[in-house]
Image (cartoon, rainbow, N blue to C red):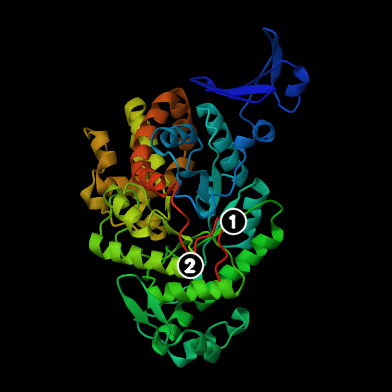
Amino acid sequence: MTLRTDHLEADVLRTADGSTLQVRAADAARLAPFEGETRPDGDGHLLSGPLSPANAAALREAFEVLRPRPIGDTRTSVGTGDRLGLATAGQARAFRDQGAGLAPVLAQQSIREMDRLGRDALSVIDEATFGCLEEGWDGGYGADCDHIKTTEGIDRGLAAGFVTFTLDPGDHVVDVTGGITAQQLAEVPWEALGDDLESLRDRYVGTVLDLGGSRIEITREAIDTAAVKYGAAVAEAARLFRHLQGSARHEVEAEIAVDETAWLTTFVEHHYMAGELARLGVEWFSFAPRYVDGFEKGVEFLGDEDELRENLTAHHAISRLHGGYKISLHSGSDKFSIYPLAVAATDGHVHLKTSGTSYLCALEVIARHDPELLAQIWDISRAAYARSRASYQVSAHEDRTPETLEGVYTAALIAASDSRQILHVGYGDSLVASDAQGVVLGERLRRVLEAHHAEYSEVLAAHIGRHLAPFAAAAGDRAGQPQADGERADAVGVG
């Protein structure tokens, strides 16, 4: 498909021999920012060039719709993620077909995944740019530098042009399951928090949280525990946010995420974090607490749906107490059974994140066209699972899966929970490994997907579309409704 301005039209051609950018203009001078070969074309000129960083930058300069933009807190939103750099066209088609009214985040990858795959942050933006052009997507998109734990990660994202930064202070969360001690209370970073224990207690103890269906009075024990558990995380999130705000030279927004920890975020703890982050001047549009168990990678929700409904409803109520930010569902891939529940519990004020499911869609295409490559990926993923699983919430067992793929129906393998999780978390080892001829498997995989890119986009559009439809329905319901009390039209700075 093609995008047009008054002076240019551009598209991407993908073939078995590779991919090419084509840009047409009546005036050859309009093609000067692009690199490639130019020739006469009817009444104008046609440039054919590579999908290079220079051409991606030139496209973003020429087409406003190809520049990432903040998604804000008012629209239901979904981030789709792309480990390979070839999924954006299919994902954009899914938004076109089944995601009306949603704010799409089509460039989304964590620093952890970038490092595992040897990708740089700019390539994530560039490949989303070309994917949007390929699909002719003119609906805009966000770019999320996900799960940032360091200022260096922020700097990498800013240099590349990311606009959304998911700040993850999860490494600073303290295990309080055995209770807390006076020593732990003393070790809370009070100076960094600009606070002291007595002042904290004065602000919170005796406060009653109205969670809609229930009310909770905050006790001294509960707030002391919250300070021990999350005090250092709050201080770290504030430090990262100040660095982001002080370093950004373009519009940015922040999400706060503590979901990748082992311990449930209680409602008092969520309220504590929101209140203290706001007191420290932090602004955010979305918040990801650690929910009830059941959010595992690549498979359906495995927990208690009634418990989840209560959990999400209360977290949403707390967000409303602090100005109305979105509740973010990470590890959201393939949780089809709970999407309507999540929409209802949050009144559609929710941000869904998916990522690895698009990689699994790629493996479906590989299974059809290069089963030998899939077998190599399976062998590496299965062997690496014991180590790879440490970074993810998964429960697959290798002994419930085949050792080799000989005689195995691969479509069923990719769909089955145990093998699906093994493939999901084994991507890092698989894609950087080399075959017997020294060819990197990730490059082999890309070549197959390039040759069958229309098929890959079709698979993605259908699969991602299943994720989007329930949230799009919520977005449609919210459209035209008066803004709820406490909600704001811009990215939220609560307090």
Does residue 344 sit above or below 24 in this rendering? below
Q: How far apart are marks 1 and 2 (CA)?
A: 19 Å
Tell me residue 273's x, y (percent): 49, 73
**Does dot 1 land on a helix, a strand or a loop?**
strand
The answer to which quarter of the image holds residue 269 is: bottom left
Q: Which residue lies furthest to the top in this view?
A: 42
Which one is closest to the eye, mark 1 or mark 2?
1
Residue 216, position in %: x, y? 35, 80
- The residue depicted at 56 percent of the width and 29 percent of the height is 133
Mark 1 Cα within 10 Å, few/some/many (few <14, many 20+)? many
Query: Label 1, on which residue?
Result: 253
Q: Mark 1: which amino acid?
A: Glu
**Secondary structure under the numbered disc 2 in the rendered image:** helix
Q: Earlier in the sequence, mark 1 or mark 2?
A: 2
Name which residue type carries label 2.
Gly
Quarter of the figure with residue 150: bottom right
Question: In this picture, is 443 found above or below 306?
Answer: above
Q: Quadrant of the C terminus?
A: bottom right
- Which image quarter: residue 180? bottom left
- Tell me the residue that label 2 is attached to: 170
Does residue 271 appear in the picture of this structure? Answer: yes
